[in-house]
Image: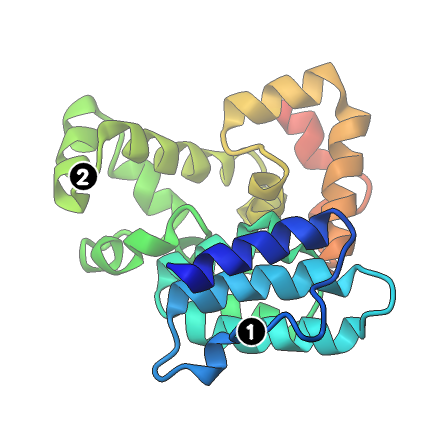
Amino acid sequence: MLPFAENLKYCVEALCGRAPQADAGWLHPHEEAPPSPRLTYDHACLDCFLADLPGQDRELRLGEAVEDLRFAVATDDDKSGAATDPCFSALRADDRFRRLVGTPPGHFLDLSVLASHKEPLTKAGITSAFDLVRRTRSTAQRDQLAAYLKVSRVVVDQLRDVAMLAQVHRDLSEPAMLHLLIAVGVASPAALREEARRNPKQLVSRIRSQASEERLKLRGVRPPWLWLIAARR
């Protein structure tokens, strides 16, 4: 437990603007055999925190973060978690990080909320937003899918919401555009409608900022925002 406690200590210090002393003596996970995935993940967070401190070699630190994550993200769940973890916001535009965690998603089932269910959904013949909506129309169908995926009905309802969000407008059917919406906290048609009616300019600004941070050039990010008009109906 000591390495985890030390990492937490240094993370707190870094967030307070203090870098660990050169003689701090904390063990980098790559020096262990085999490295602990959880510890390398925590060290990647620390690398990113340190990258923002004065006197630190930012590119070196970010490179170390990516290397740490190569040990840490072994499963689709791991990759989805890292892709949306605010600790790694400095890496969002880094091609090495994007390749590692699979962003932007190239397929509907690669979205962070769906990635952990990709294999069973594919086996069930559900590979698109259209498939998911069609196969969850009734309460009985949703209960059946929840049992099949071994999750609660709440999770199935969340997956269905994302699938229905993709059908609001053709611009939102792009997985990368759905990824942006989810990243800014919009994961259902109802949430999109509320945001679009309440403060559309702020919503567009948040999406464009996220797209810029991740270097995504999508049709839905540029005016005219036809999806926004569709969402307000």
Residue name at image x 58 percent, y 74 percent: 25
Give residue 193's position: percent from left, percent from top.
60, 21
Residue name at image x 61 percent, y 48 percent: 86
Residue 218's image quarter? bottom right
Residue 84 against residue 23 in the figure, above or below: above
Q: Look at discs 1 and 2 and give the one toward the viewer.
A: 1
The residue that mark 1 highlights is 99
Residue 58's image quarter? bottom right
Residue 52 against residue 60 in the figure, above or below: above
**Sequence order check, earlier mark of 1 and 2:** 1
The CA span between labels 1 and 2 is: 31 Å
Q: Is residue 16 left or right of residue 181?
A: right
Residue 127 visible in this rendered orientation of the protein: no
Q: Secondary structure at mark 1?
A: helix
Residue 204 against residue 24 in the figure, above or below: above
Residue type at numbered disc 2: Leu
* Circle count: 2
Q: Is residue 159 left or right of residue 169?
A: left
Residue 143's image quarter? top left
The residue that mark 2 highlights is 145
Query: Callout 1: 10 Å neighbours few (<14), some, many (20+)?
Result: few
Residue name at image x 25 percent, y 60 percent: 119
Residue name at image x 47 percent, y 55 percent: 5
Residue type at numbered disc 1: Arg
Residue 167 visible in this rendered orientation of the protein: yes
Q: Quadrant of the C terminus?
A: top right
Q: Quadrant of the N terminus?
A: bottom left
